[in-house]
Image (cartoon, rainbow, N blue to C red):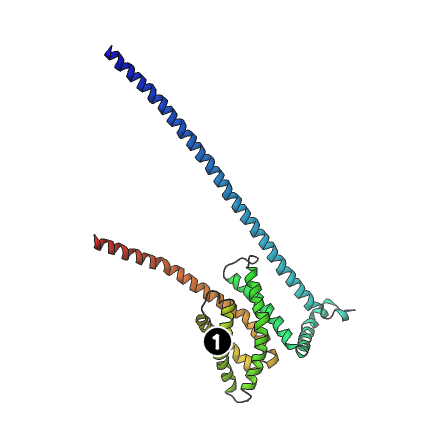
Amino acid sequence: MAVSWVGGGGVESELASQVGGFGASEGRFSFEGGAEFQGFGSGSGVGEEIESGEIERLIDRTINGTIVLAAGTYAITRLLTIDQDYWHGWTLYEILRYAPQHNWSAYEEALKTNPVLVKIMISGVVYSVGDWIAQCFEGKPLFEFDRARMFKSGLVGFTLHGSLSHYYYQFCEELFPFQDWWVVPAKVIFDQTAWAAVWNSIYYIVLGFFGLSPHSAFLAGWKLWPFAHLITYGVVPVEQRLLWVDCVELIWVTILSTYSSEKSEARISDAPVEANSGASNTNSHEEYLV
């Protein structure tokens, strides 16, 4: 009987283990199924976020493309229709032939009528286009530029650069009212020291130099502006100087952007070296303690 009782206990324990195992497996099945279901829901959420990001990107590209095409169409139309009041009987060749000359005449007439307004409008347009070019050189697609950044850059050109430069060039002529050979080099030196320091500080405070410090931007400017200003002060008339400088600005922002990208790549490439150096120093210190 004792043996029979022990055997019965073994059967009972075996049944209990089977039941317990079944329950455990059931619990595990339910948990794993819940995990799978939760994972499916998480993947669906990530998919929705990616799809939402693609939609926002498409909207941004559409808006930017509309802005570029509208501005370009307006500018080209204004330039080509400068003589529309006299087009009667003109051929397409005549329209295209006289458009540059008559646009330049209209520009000079506007300079005489309202020079400050003309110059601030030109600077606003050039600074906007220049920032767009800079963003493209930084690696952004053509229609995926930062509108807020481009608007701020254009606003700086419109409100500050055009008006300040107009009065600065007049002041520079009064400061050096001579015709000697040394006047042009003196103006270039004054421009690249006093005026460059003032304008670079203003620009850096308002926008920043694409991640560069004012000192770095100041040194980068010496790669271009001294040579450009030999033409500015030696060839170009006073009233036309801002237009010439704004055209050079398009090259200048490209240099700034490229210089900034090189600096950023150098910092990124140096970061792993510094991290590895720090890790090796830590390991050496731990080994020393051991």
- Residue at the spot 59% in from the left edge and 71% down from the top edge: 159
Give the camera-side residue of 261 and 164: 164
User: Measured from the top left, where is residue 30 in percent x and y?
Assistant: 43, 30
Instruction: Determine the secondary structure under disc 1.
Output: helix
The quarter of the rendered structure image containing the N terminus is: top left
Residue 84 placement: quadrant: bottom right
User: Measured from the top left, where is residue 91 in percent x and y?
Assistant: 74, 68
| Vertical comparison of 21 with 222: above or below | above
Answer yes or no: is residue 19 visible: yes
User: Measured from the top left, where is residue 247 in percent x and y?
Assistant: 57, 72
| Vertical comparison of 13 with 35: above or below | above
Q: Which residue is disc 1 drawn over? A: 197
Report the side of 66 relative to 266 (left or right): right
Report the side of 97 relative to 279 (left or right): right
The residue lying furthest to the top in this view is 1
At label 1, counting other C-alpha atoms closer than 10 Å, the crowd grade (few under 14, some 14-19, many 20 or more) is some
Give the camera-side residue of 248 and 287: 287
Indicate the amino acid at tag 1.
Ala
